[in-house]
Image: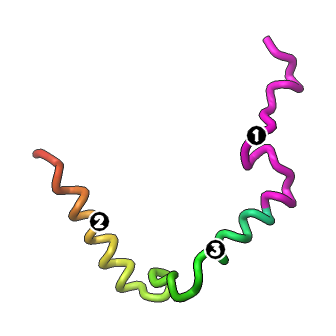
Amino acid sequence: MMPKDQLASTRGFASMGEARQKEIASKGGRSVPAEKRSFSQNRGLASQAGRKGGQASGTTRHT
C-alpha cells in the first residue's frame, strides 16, 4: 500500500490550485462568440432543439 501523501494524483483539474481552476473555468463562457450562443439568447430555439433531440433518441426504443 502506498503512503497517504502519494495517493493524491498530480493530474487533472482537481489537482490544480484554486487560482488555476478559476482561470480555466472563467474561459468557458468566453470560448464561444456571442453570435454562436443562440440557445442562451433564444429560449424557443433551445426548446425546439431539445424536443428534436428527444424525438431522435426515442426512435430506437422498442416497447
Which quadrant would the N terminus be assigned to in this image? Answer: top right
Res 25 quadrant in image? bottom right
Which region is colored magenta?
A: 1-21
Hey, what amino acid is under mark 2? Gly
Mark 3 element type: loop
Mark 1 element type: loop
Q: Which mark is residue 11?
A: 1
The residue depicted at 33 percent of the width and 70 percent of the height is: 50
Asked if residue 37 lies in the magenta stretch, the reply is no
x then y, percent, for residue 6: 85, 25
Residue bearing the label numbered 3? 31
x then y, percent, for residue 44: 35, 85
Q: In the image, is 55 to the left or to the right of 33? A: left
Chain-order first, disc 1 or disc 2? 1
Chain-order first, disc 1 or disc 3? 1
Say few, some or many: other residues with alpha carbon within 10 Å of mark 1 (under 14 / 14 to 19 / 20 or more).
few
Say few, some or many: other residues with alpha carbon within 10 Å of mark 2 (under 14 / 14 to 19 / 20 or more).
few
